[in-house]
Image (cartoon, rainbow, N blue to C red):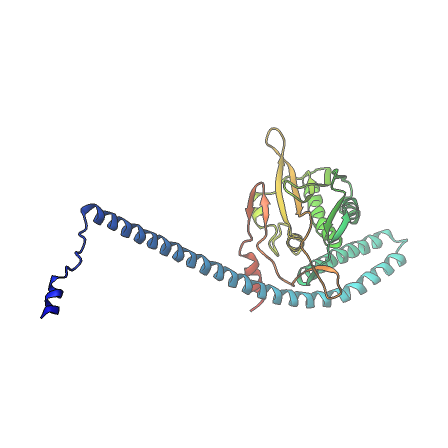
């Protein structure tokens, strides 16, 4: 009884009451947390959408690369089969030229056959270059040697044109695979020479300059009629050409070479003070040094698989453009 009385006498702690201000502060904190949760949820949902889009693009690029690789293997096989008889035709042509040396009319016909064989051999070479695996072996290379060798290799195409070469101070050496940059330059010089002749131009310039950022710029300028914007958008896509003859692979090979060098290509039209187009300028933009890894033999190299192409980073002025669907359409048209 005494114990019960003690319990009754104990005072239980009173529950503090919430004022209107406390309740308002609590509701404000609750709303703030809820808003943050909704914002986080929205951000996460956007990130999931972005990742799904990137995954779909990566899968699409992978499938495109597989189709291009299959197309490249098929083209390489056909090209090898064509190149063998071409060698025989070239040999017989030379023999005929010797036998018909004193018969100018017949000899001129043989000369035409020889030029046709040379043109066909260049086409086969483009197909093989596009289809084969690229092994980039970068090294410090003389800039003057690179551009002089490329110009000398295009003597026949440049016949009748005045070509100026220049290496800016501080650009005496570049880090690249000299044979591949040599090939890329040849393809660009030939295109520029054709455009110059088609529009009655007389001058071309090949120069090595310091890039706008770090790195180097190898620029080929012609005095042709310039390049239409819609052509600039597509000119580096495989099999695209504005000419009746040719494979349309020359400039896509240029892109693959620059892609392997972690570089890009810039295309722009030159204009005089009055705004009239005075030709085009195509620049190979190279980094100051190429990231590389060692091959099994211990040599620095970068491997680009046959048919592999990223989206071309073609810069028209300051705008960058990607490849159109023609790459995939070409592959789908040839490979089931």
The N terminus appears in which quarter of the rendering? bottom left
Residue farthest to the top? 274
Q: Nearer the viewer, residue 188 or 60?
A: 60
Dividing the picture into quarters, in which one does residue 282 lie? top right
Q: Quadrant of residue 124?
A: bottom right
Q: Where is residue 73 in the image (x, y as percent from the top left)?
A: 65, 67
Q: Using the image, determine if residue 202 lies above or below residue 145.
A: above
**In this view, 193 is above or below 124:** above
Given residues 329 and 282, the one toward you in this image is: 282
Indicate the quadrant containing the C terminus: top left, top right, bottom left or bottom right: bottom right
- Count of numbered marks: 0
Q: Which residue is drawn at 62% across and 39% down?
A: 269
Is 11 in front, or is 148?
11
Q: Which residue is drawn at 69% across and 68% down?
A: 77
Please state if 283 lies on the left or on the right of 103 as rendered: left
| Looking at the image, residue 85 lies above or below residue 166 | below
Relative placement, left or right, of 5 versus 252 is left
* Residue at position x 75%, y 61% in the image: 299
- Give percent across and percent down for residue 202: 73, 37
The furthest residue to the bottom:
1
- The vertical placement of 48 against 197, above or below, is below
**Image coords of residue 277 (percent x, y):** 62, 35
Residue 309: percent from left, percent from top: 60, 58
- The image quarter containing residue 279 is top right
Which residue appears at 59% of the width and 50% of the height?
Answer: 313
């Amino acid at each position: 009884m005494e114990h019960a009385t003690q319990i009754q006498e104990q005072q239980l702690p009173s529950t503090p009451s919430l004022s209107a201000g406390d309740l308002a502060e609590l509701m404000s904190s609750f709303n703030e947390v809820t808003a943050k949760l909704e914002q986080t949820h929205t951000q996460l949902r956007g990130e999931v959408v972005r990742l799904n889009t990137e995954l779909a693009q990566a899968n699409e690029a992978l499938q495109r690369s597989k189709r291009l690789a299959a197309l490249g293997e098929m083209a390489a096989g056909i090209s090898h089969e064509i190149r063998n008889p071409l060698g025989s035709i070239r040999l017989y042509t030379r023999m005929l030229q010797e036998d018909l040396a004193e018969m100018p009319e017949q000899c001129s016909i043989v000369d035409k056959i020889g030029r046709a064989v040379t043109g066909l051999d260049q086409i086969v070479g483009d197909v093989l270059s596009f289809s084969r695996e690229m092994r980039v072996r970068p090294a410090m290379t003389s800039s003057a040697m690179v551009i002089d060798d490329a110009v000398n290799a295009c003597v026949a195409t440049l016949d009748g044109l005045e070509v100026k070469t220049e290496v800016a101070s501080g650009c005496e050496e570049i880090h690249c695979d000299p044979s591949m940059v040599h090939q890329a330059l040849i393809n660009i010089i030939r295109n520029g020479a054709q455009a110059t002749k088609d529009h009655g131009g007389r001058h071309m310039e090949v120069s090595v300059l310091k890039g706008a950022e770090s790195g180097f710029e190898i620029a080929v300028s012609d005095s042709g009629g310039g390049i239409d914007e819609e052509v600039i958008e597509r000119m580096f896509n495989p099999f695209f050409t504005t000419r009746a003859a040719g494979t349309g692979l020359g400039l896509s090979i240029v892109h693959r070479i620059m892609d392997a060098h972690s570089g890009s290509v810039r295309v722009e039209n030159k204009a005089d003070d009055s705004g009239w187009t005075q030709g085009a300028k195509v620049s190979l933009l190279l980094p100051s040094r190429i990231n590389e890894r060692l091959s099994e033999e211990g040599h620095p190299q970068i491997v680009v698989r046959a048919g592999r192409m990223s989206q071309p980073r073609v810069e028209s002025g300051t705008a960058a453009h990607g490849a159109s669907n023609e790459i995939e359409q070409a592959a789908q048209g040839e490979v089931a």
